[in-house]
Image (cartoon, rainbow, N blue to C red):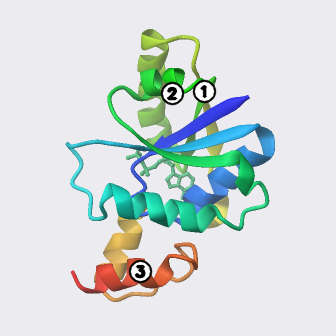
Amino acid sequence: MKVCYPGTFDPITKGHIDIIERASRMFDEVVVLIMHNPAKNCLFSEEERTQFIRDSIADLPHAEKIQVMVGSGLTVEYAASIGASAIIRGIRAVSDYEYELMQATANMYLNDRVETLLLIARPQYSFLSSSVVKEIGMNHGDISELVPEQILERVAEKLRSR
Ligand code: ADP
């Protein structure tokens, strides 16, 4: 079964990596999908985000099952167009659940052949988001436990310069 894990990944964190790793244990193919969203003011370019994800997944146990793509338009239609049977999303708190429930229900309305599967965040990452990484990094705090070590220096340097 092929699944996709869509998001903004601005930048990818250890919380995202944990979801990717867990999905890659369960499914044959996992497409990490950076969704092009002009409404979001991203700090890192799509090229940077793609490279960060590629570098971060390279040493995962099932790296050969994982691909990185950039998509645009409706996520569920994009997922269907690449042959994914399900969209994976992560849930950290009840507030995430409320948002994801709405998204998943809207996606069901658009295309009910693509399921949404929600994975619960590991407790040590339940506070972790790309925004938290940016906030801490821009204020010169320590993000070394929050982003994969392969991208730490590049992310930290850009954040420090802001
Ligand atoms: P989006 O803008 O689509 O929410 P994100 O890159 O912020 O994109 O997140 C992508 C997905 O990963 C979302 O489902 C989000 O809830 C989930 N996620 C983000 N951080 C974590 C984390 N620390 N643990 C588990 N899931 C997470």
Q: Quadrant of the N terminus?
A: top right
Image vertical order of residue 44 relative to residue 147, above or below = above
Q: Earlier in the sequence, mark 3 or mark 1?
A: 1
* Mark 3 and mark 2: Cα distance apart in space: 30 Å
Q: Does the beta carbon at disc 1 come under 8 Å from ligand 1?
A: no
Kindly identify the amino acid type of the residue bearing the numbered disc 2.
Ala
* Mark 1 and mark 2: Cα distance apart in space: 5 Å
Q: Nearer the viewer, residue 53 or 95?
A: 53
Q: Quadrant of the C terminus?
A: bottom left
Label 2 sits on residue: 79
* Numbered disc 3: secondary structure: helix
Residue 101 in sight in this render: yes
Q: Position of residue 147 (x, y in %)?
A: 52, 73
Q: Position of residue 25 (x, y in %)?
A: 79, 47
Label 1 sits on residue: 84
Disc 3 + disc 1, Cβ < 8 Å: no
Q: Earlier in the sequence, mark 1 or mark 2?
A: 2
Q: Around disc 1, counting alpha carbons within 10 Å, would you say few (fewer than 14), some (14 to 19), or many (20 or more)?
A: many
Kindly identify the amino acid type of the residue bearing the numbered disc 1.
Ala
Disc 3 + disc 2, Cβ < 8 Å: no
* Mark 3 and mark 1: Cα distance apart in space: 32 Å
